[in-house]
Amino acid sequence: MAEVVVDFRSDTLTRPSPAMREAMATAVVGDDVFDEDPTLHELQAEVAALFGHEAALFAPSGTMANQIALQLAVPRGEELLCDAAAHVVTDEIGAAAALGGVSTRTWPSAAADLDPATVADMIRPDGFVAVPTRAVAVEQTHNRLGGAVIPLATLEALRAVTTEAAVHLHCDGARIWHAHVADGVPLDAYGRLFDSLSVCLSKGLGAPVGSLIIGSAERIAAARKLRKRLGGGMRQAGILAAAGLYALRNNIPRLADDHARAHRLAEALSPSGVVDPARIRTNIVPLDLTGTAIDGPAFAAAARDQGILVSVLGRRLVRLVTHMDQTDDGIDHAVKVLPALL
C-alpha cells in the first residue's frame, strides 16, 4: 500500500489537537460513578442547555447513548419505528433487540425525503392486534444516506404526528452539528422537537471519545442507572469531558470547511455518474458504483494503492467522509486520482 495521503473512512479518525490535549491534561476531575466530576457536570449542563432540555448524560459511545434512550422509551417486546438504513438498526449490532428486547419495524430509507404521513400510517396504537408502537427514531444527519439533512419543517410535521399518537420521538443526532451548520437551524430548535436525543463529540468535532443522551431530568436520572447496568459508568471522566467542551466551543463553525471539501469531491466525481453534487450538503459523499465497471472492494483497493482510504458499505456502495484532520493537498490528490479509477 502507498503511504496514506488522505483518509476518508470516517470523521471518527481525528486526533485531539494540542489545545484539546492541554484542556484534557488540566481538567479538574472527580469520580463520575459518585456523580462528583465537575468537568463532566459542566459538559452535561452545557449540552442540555444548547438543546433546550433539562439534563444530559455522558456515555462512552453513540451506540450506548442511543440504546439507553430507546430502552427508556420502548418497553420490552414493544415497537420502535425507524428507517431501514438507520444507525440504530444497521450499525449497532442488533443491540435494540439483544439488549432492550425492542421490536423494530422500518419504512423505506428516504432521509431528507422522509414523509411524516408514511410514519403516521405505520403507528400501531394500544389495543391493536399487534405490537404497539412506542417510539419513532430519526437520524440527523443520516450516515448511510449521504449525510442528508432532514428539513426542519419535516421534523415539525413528524413531531405533530408523534404527539397526536402519544409516541416518543428520538433523534440519533450523532452529526446534528452538521445539520445545524448546513441549514442554520439553532440547536434548541431541534431540541424542542424531540423527547430524547443522542449527540456525538467524536464525529466531526474532533473529541476522542463520547456521546451524550439529552432529555428531561427524570429521563436522565433513569438513564444514569441504565448506563451503569450496561457498563458505562466511568471514574475520572472529566478528562474526556474536557475534550468535549473544547470541541463544542471551538470546532462547530469549522464544519462548513468539511462541507465545502465534500462538495468539491462530489463535483469532481459527478461526471462518472456516481454521485449527485446537489444532494451533498454536509461531510459525507456516497458513491453508487452501479453504473461503473468497478465494484466497491476493487475501487477501495485501487484507491488504497494511490494513498487514499475509503469505506466500503456494500458491493456497489463506497463512502467518503471529510473531516478536520484532512488538508487541501489531500483533497487535491483525491480529486486528481479518484475520477480516473472510475
Image (spheres, rainbow, N blue to C red):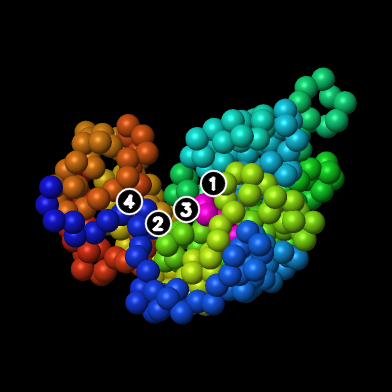
The secondary structure type at the circle numbered 2 is loop
Q: Disc 3 versus disc 4: distance between alpha carbons? A: 14 Å
- State which tag comes first along the sequence, 2 or 3: 2
Q: Is residue 190 above or below residue 161?
A: below
Q: Is residue 219 left or right of residue 341?
A: right
Where residue 320 appears, as percent x and y from the top left, is 34, 51
* Residues rendered magenta in the picture: 58-64
The secondary structure type at the circle numbered 3 is loop
Q: Disc 1 versus disc 3: distance between alpha carbons? A: 18 Å
The residue where tag 3 is placed is 147
Please name whichever residue, 281 or 90, is drawn nearer the observer in this view of the structure. Answer: 90
Q: Is residue 145 above or below residue 329?
A: above
The residue where tag 4 is placed is 9
Q: Disc 1 versus disc 4: distance between alpha carbons? A: 19 Å
59 part of magenta stretch: yes
Please name whichever residue, 79 or 68, is drawn nearer the observer in this view of the structure. Answer: 68
Q: Nearer the viewer, mark 1 or mark 4?
A: 1
Q: Are marks 1 and 4 in contact (CB under 8 Å)?
A: no
Q: Which mark is residue 63?
A: 1
Q: On the image, which quarter does residue 19 sit in?
A: bottom left
